[in-house]
Image (cartoon, rainbow, N blue to C red):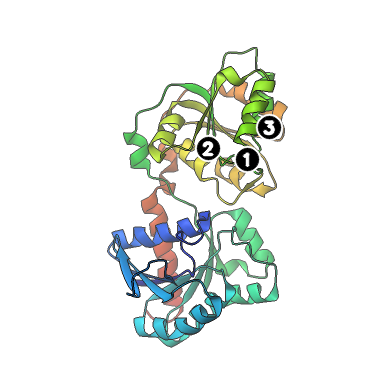
Amino acid sequence: MRVAFVSMTTTRHRDTEGTRRLERVAHQLADRGHDVTVYCAAWWDEYDDQRTIDGVTYHGVTVSPARTSFAARLPVLLARHRPDVIHVAPRPPAAVFGASTGGTLARAPLIVEWYGDEGLADSRTVTQSLREAAAVITPSELVRTQVRERGIDDGRTEQIPNGIDLSLVQSVDPAEPVEVAFAHRLDESANVDSLLLALAELRDRDWSATIVGDGPLRDDYERQAADLRIDDRITFVGEVSREERVAIYRGAHTFVHTAYREYFATELLWALGAGSVGIVEYQANSSAHELIENHHRSFRVTDPQELADAIVESGSLERWSFDDSFASYDHAAVVDAYLDVYRDVIAAHGLF
């Protein structure tokens, strides 16, 4: 299948979760043997308008992000390329309209990837750009609801989660056992306070915790742990590799998620796949609770006291270092889900 991705900014311009996800899907499709081109603003200094990285062709539509000229040049480029399907990031909306025109010329359906972190206003222009798509793909029900609230009907929305590599989970040796693991960028949305207060309630019990991640509030959280007199049992490991994260999750009894905002709780998913018991503090702007709704090795809580109780109660559950019930979230299954959407919209477009 020939797939054209349209994303004016790549991770070289603006490194966001949504941009990383779109590029990850592009490379996974290329690994499957599909013909994949990403139409973007160039980030390289050479005069060539294309470069190929790990099987994916990056085509520089403009020499830098410039929404008007980027959108204006897209239709002709896409018409010449004649892809089977066009997969576009929603930011900026002008690029969606340009890609839609290119799709009309190339007789290819348009799919919009809406991750939730695009920072787009709730405007008529954005809504209209979404209506150009045959399907809008979101990572979670939380984000899918936000898309529906913009006037896009259920029949044109698809929910596809982020994926994890379960073969990697099985290949990494567990780290030293700890009772609690936590992972998130340590910023204002992490809400590590809730975890620290819960652990302080348990200071008379025997436990240890590992906090993964770095960010502007790391020093504040470390000071808070010291003020609560629990810093000797908490290890802040900072940013670590994926393999090191997986090892920590495999060694942990529980994984606690407290963040205020999460479009898709990827680290929670890795931890669940690695056998950790999931404890999620419910937040209105987080999708984390969706991952544990039907998972028996999990707890949903609403405050630090309930969180402390759940940590204690989780002790009655056996320690695991792998959970094959999350096979449907493996990278291969997620790529299959994207291909199913592509085939459905192509068939509906009258090309098969």
Residue tagged 1:
190
What is the quadrant of the N terminus in the image? bottom left
User: The disc labelled 1 sits on which kind of residue?
Assistant: Ala
Looking at the rendered image, the disc whose residue lies closer to the viewer, 3 or 2, is 2
Q: Could one spot residue 3 in this view of the protein?
A: yes
Residue tagged 2:
213
**Percent position (x, y) of residue 46?**
33, 70
Residue 282, compared with residue 91, is above or below; it is above
Mark 3 and mark 2 lie on one chain; the one further toward the N terminus is 3
Crowding near the residue tagged with mark 1, few <14, some 14–19, many ≥20 C-alpha atoms within 10 Å: many
Residue in the image at 37% along x and 76% along y: 84
**Percent position (x, y) of residue 139?**
53, 55
Mark 2 and mark 1 lie on one chain; the one further toward the N terminus is 1
Q: Viewed as shown, does residue 322 lie left or right of 289?
A: left
**Percent position (x, y) of residue 202?**
65, 18
Spatial CA distance of label 3 from label 2 is 16 Å
What is the quadrant of the C terminus in the image? bottom left
Residue tagged 3:
194
Q: Secondary structure at mark 2?
A: loop
User: The disc labelled 3 sits on which kind of residue?
Assistant: Ser
Residue in the image at 56% along x and 17% along y: 207
Q: Secondary structure at mark 1?
A: loop
Find out whether the residues at labels 2 and 1 contact each other: C-beta distance under 8 Å.
yes
User: The disc labelled 2 sits on which kind of residue?
Assistant: Gly
Report which quarter residue 144 is drawn in. Answer: bottom right
Residue 304, compared with residue 316, is above or below; it is below
Residue in the image at 40% along x and 73% along y: 60
**Percent position (x, y) of residue 215?**
57, 41
